[in-house]
Amino acid sequence: MAIKDIVDPPVVLDQMPDPVALLDKTIAAPEISEQLNIFPIEWKVNTPRLLDIYEASRDPGWSPNTLPWDTFDASTLTQDQRYAIAYWWSLLSVFDASGPAVFARAMIHAYEKKEEDAIRKCFFSVTRDEMNHEEVCGRAIKACTPNGPLDYEPTTTLGRLARNNVQWLYYNGARYWDGFKNAVEEYPIPILFSSFLFGEVASSTLFASMQETTTIPVFKEAFKHIARDEGRHLSICLAVLKNILPTLSEDEKMMITKQIRAGFIFLSGVLYEPPAEFWKLPDTFIPAQRMLEEEARSAGFGVLSHEQRKKNWRVAVLRMKQTLDPYGIKFPALPEIGIDGETVDFEVGKIIPIF
Ligand SMILES: [Fe+2]
Ligand SMILES: [Fe+2]
């Protein structure tokens, strides 16, 4: 193409435009009196504490790929010990692998509800953390059983029992997502946050105790960091709830009572032992799980005993109760761990709490 063939652009200015003349000619833009869709046009912070937590989370201080994986040599363990450790991480992944999608959905919900910027950002950081936790599950499982949790052939009886249990767990855990999606739309923010709080109370308790009892360095280190992340998630929930719990209606209070029972049933699957109201499992499940836990312990992987778990879960639940009591929220009866309270029904399709 020759220079003479180049066409002029549509507007050629022979001098700088006069701003006053330009302003005279402007056409009034559509009035923006409210946000037109879910994308924000403001960055308000009503709860400075939330922004502080977000600032602290910008660099979580660790990453799954820089954990000392090279210190873990699976070949020093027996085959059954490897199956047993991979089993525990697979059990955890039924909960933790839901984290990224669940919190990403909650983050979008915060945009839809036009929540303050600090809440939106906090959900973003929780989503990122949960992605890290999920990654640790995957790496730990693969370090013990390449191609695990499902795509390998167990060679021992205990390995086959582990496989069967994992399939049952995953089958049950899969029912959680649809319930969560609907519940997020349906419930007001205070209910959602009380439920998230329960999940975070549970997870911070679980990881803190696993950190204490595990002697395998890479897992001890992973538990330390995950526990710290979960503690931050707990602080986020508390900061939001501090603002909204005093404003609850009686109906909302009752919804929270019911949600605590639902959360207890769901989370007991990893914190204690899975209650039959939600968890449809065969009779072989618990005996196989107990054997696998024993095997994992023999390798230095600190799964708590049945009794320690019960005690631990009870302490966590009582922490939850202490937080809600001052706001006149009745606690549900949790006879499984010896806690008295209101008898409430359990709706399988409406479970929100998550790690
Ligand atoms: Fe998590
Ligand atoms: Fe969490």
Image: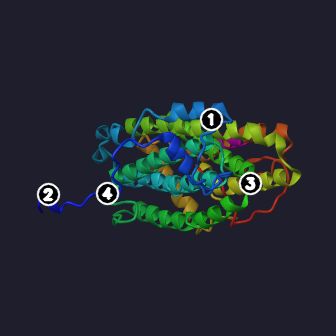
Q: Residues within 10 Å of mark 2 (few under 14, many from 20)?
A: few
Q: Looking at the picture, does residue 211 appear above or below residue 21?
A: above
Depth check: 325 or 78 in front? 325
Question: Which is more toward the observer, 188 or 100?
Answer: 188
Inter-mark Cα distance, 1 to 4: 40 Å
> Cα distance, mark 4 to mark 2?
63 Å
Q: Earlier in the sequence, mark 1 or mark 2?
A: 2
Q: Residue at x 76, y 63 (%)?
A: 346
Q: Residue 295 location, x and y as percent? A: 45, 49
Mark 2 is on which residue type? Answer: Ile
The local secondary structure at tag 3 comes to loop
Residue 146 tag number: 4
Answer with left or right where residue 60 lies relative to residue 191. Answer: left
The magenta span reads 312-318
Q: For the residue marked with disc 1, what is the amino acid?
A: Leu
**Residue receiving disc 2:** 3
Q: Which mark is residue 50?
A: 1
Residue type, label 4: Pro
Q: Report which quarter residue 236 is drawn in.
A: top right
Q: Amino acid at mark 3?
A: Pro
Q: 295 left or right of 51? A: left
